[in-house]
Image (cartoon, grey):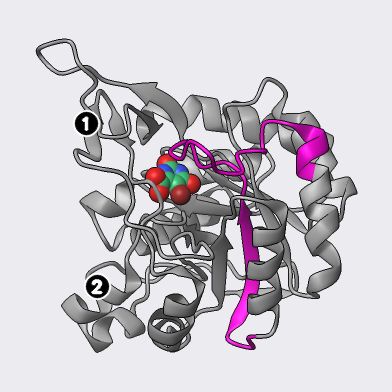
Amino acid sequence: MIGAPPTLALSVDFCGLDLAHPIINGSGTFDAIAARRAFGDELFERFPFSAFVSKTVTLEPRQGNPPPRLWEVAGGLMNSIGLPNKGLDGYLEHDLPILAALPVPLIVNVMGFSREEVAALVDAFAARPEVSAIELNVSCPNVETGLVLGADPDETARLVHRVRPLTGKPLIVKLTPNASDVAAVATAAQDAGADALSLINTLRGMALDRTGKPWLGGVTGGVSGPAVRAIALAQVYAVAQAVEIPIVGMGGVQSGRDARDLIEAGATLVAVGTESFRDPAAGLRIASELSELLANTAV
Ligand code: RRO
């Protein structure tokens, strides 16, 4: 993989994790297992992120949504992937041993279809020393019956209250931009015991084919990429004004400048998502650009 390491030391403490720089990946946007197969040891020597967030894990295995699952929008991408994954047991047996060998801390992203399912997932990962932190996905736009409670402050608080006693590991709550008052949900998560927040997940969208029928197998999808960057910046800023816990900012980040903007808006870490599909080494490039930007503006 290409990409020069950052020139200025950008190390950052995030919920007690000592990270080499502030750039991580957005859940589900970088397949570290496939990348390891493609790039071999070079991936470990120049890993693009300072921590790795895995694709969402559910209790039971899932096939995901029917195809088509992707649609290119102006300035971005719309997905309706629908959480395909091996389920908790499959993840523990097949994925965790490989991901645990990555040279950076592992953050596991989980989602349930009830509070008790989320509790079972948190309980299981709480017991695994390979896992450094747990991200609660309360914001996937692509499942009908999922616990998409991230739009409601009380429901979010109930979930965080339920799982908080189960683990001493940092709990990150991933928020949806599809909420009328994202700062209210953020505050509810913080007050219920979340250690950090991440935002934004994708914005619900839709595309029609030439005959006027929905293109995506899941009918609607989640929009990401540069098209959502201004929305992400505004929401990170609004949440940062409302909470004291650290924020992982994401949404359309393509450059060091974009990352710097999210940090200025109040993010501690910045996640790269859609850009990694174009350039698997984007994380390292963006960390390097951020480092140069900060070195040039340092007084
Ligand atoms: O798998 C997905 O369809 C998906 C998930 Br879990 C998510 O959190 N956000 C998204 O845009 N797609």
Quadrant including the N terminus: bottom left
Task: Inspect the image, locate mark 2, and give the three-letter code of the amino acid beneath it.
Answer: Ala
Please state if 160 lies on the left or on the right of 93 as rendered: right
- Comparing 78 with 227, the one in front is 78
Q: Is residue 298 above or below residue 242?
A: below
Mark 2 is surrounded, within 10 Å at the Cα level, by few (under 14), some (14 to 19) or many (20 or more) other residues, namely few
Q: Quadrant of residue 49?
A: bottom left
Q: Which residue is mark 2?
A: 34
Q: Which residue is mark 1?
A: 72
Which region of the structure is painted magenta?
Answer: 128-156
Using the image, tell me which numbered label, if any, was put on residue 285.
none
Q: Residue at x 34, y 72 (%)?
A: 32
Residue 185 location (% of width, % of height): 76, 35
User: Is residue 146 located in the magenta-colored stretch of the structure?
Assistant: yes
Q: Residue at x 25, y 31 (%)?
A: 216
Please state if 126 lies on the left or on the right of 231 as rendered: right
- Comparing 277 with 1, the one in front is 277
Please state if 38 lies on the left or on the right of 248 as rendered: left
Q: Quadrant of residue 36?
A: bottom left
